[in-house]
Image (cartoon, grey):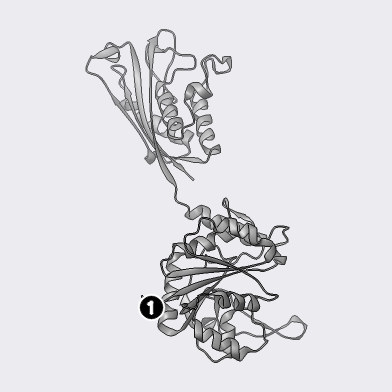
Amino acid sequence: MNDVFVSAIIAAAGSSTRMKSEVPKIFLPLCGKPVLSYSLEAFDRCSRIAEIVLVIRPEDFSRAQALCAGIKTPVKLVQGGETRFESVRRGIGAASEAATHVAIHDAARPLLSQDQLCRVIDDAVAFGAATLSTKMKDTVKFAGEGNRIESTPPRERLYAVQTPQVFEKQRYLEAVRKAGSADYTDDCQLLEKAGIPVVLTPGEYTNLKITTQEDLLFAQAILEKEAPKMLRIGHGYDVHRFADGRKLILGGIEIPYERGLLGHSDADVLLHAVMDALLGAAALGDIGTHFPDTDDRTLGADSFVLFEKTAAILSENGFSIGNIDAMVIAQEPKLMPYVQAMREKIARGAGIAVSAVSVKATTEEGLGFTGRKEGIAAHAVCTVLQG
């Protein structure tokens, strides 16, 4: 394909009347970026695209130029016409003389994948003309007089065409010469009228066109579902000494023992280590930041309630909890009988499956302060997902 020069023609000169927005739909925000940015970036990433011609309204030039600033592929801005057909003709007229093929794309289709783009270019090179398309899912009816059903075409032969539509440049220009002054809703229709066959390249239903506010919501949902999530890891450590007259609470579970742990709250050393690990992974401070021991409101507090609040803080900041691995270090008491209950309680507070929570217990063989039965320590490692 060394002799193939593909010019991408992005049609972005529409009036967006059906969107019912003061801002043109190509500049509406979609997951933090203008809709138009997605199309520009899709063609910019494709090594088969030699240039981009952006056909746009003159009043939108300055805004479009700002979006093109980070695009490495050469970009030309062209003023659009009164109709889509005229706009595309102007775009192709501005394409390089070296262009062998043109890939015509609606700027309002922001979810074009590299796989779809490569497939349709391959078919256009092989057959001269190709368009992305999907099989119709719904039964389609022809309406007659009085908006009554007249007939039902066979669904197995019906396809919804998308963009890009890719053509040998000379074939397209030949079709334009034959078309005269007629207008067409898509470029395949132009080639049909000229008797030039167009291959239907299998596309994806996610390559939707944003026409209404509902379409924008659908596109946002697709992007949010497919967006890569950043994995982050945190470590937490806590220690509390034993004290008489207090309950021993670990992992939100009361453990039968003659002494409890000393602390401003209920001194649940296990949950404190887990909370610090979660907050650390998200770079959101530590327990002392959110629940300081100088605050009377947390005096004697149930650490499980604080743990639930910690999970909520993560969620509010765009994080979800992946898994939790915790180790309790204590010479006494024996904790194995309570491990499963602690796992279940922690999983409930974190909003994750029990299978994503590990709680282990060990001794230090009589060494150190835990070995001397002066207190209990806990370590925790966890993962959180951002995005």
Image: 121 above or below 157:
above
Q: Which residue is mark 1?
A: 3
- Would residue 275 be visible to someone looking at this image? yes
Q: Residue furthest top?
A: 244
> Toward the viewer: 89 or 312?
89
The residue depicted at 51 percent of the width and 23 percent of the height is: 289
The secondary element bearing badge 1 is classed as loop
Q: Residue 74 in the image: x percent, y percent?
A: 49, 65
Q: Is residue 348 left or right of residue 85?
A: left
Q: Place residue 245 in its image quadrant.
A: top left
Image: 271 above or below 81:
above
Q: Place residue 323 in its image quadrant.
A: top left
Label total for image: 1
Q: Quadrant of the N terminus?
A: bottom left
Q: Residues within 10 Å of mark 1 (few under 14, many from 20)?
A: few
Amino acid type assigned to the residue bearing label 1 in the image:
Asp
Q: Place residue 151 in its image quadrant.
A: bottom right
Q: Residue furthest left?
A: 365
- Would residue 132 be visible to someone looking at this image? no
Q: Is residue 253 left or right of residue 178?
A: left
Image: 372 above or below 250:
above
Q: Residue 308 in the image: x percent, y percent?
A: 51, 31
> Toward the viewer: 197 or 369?
197
Image: 54 above or below 235:
below
Q: Residue 290 in the image: x percent, y percent?
A: 53, 24
Q: Residue furthest front?
A: 97
Q: Residue 322 in the image: x percent, y percent?
A: 41, 41
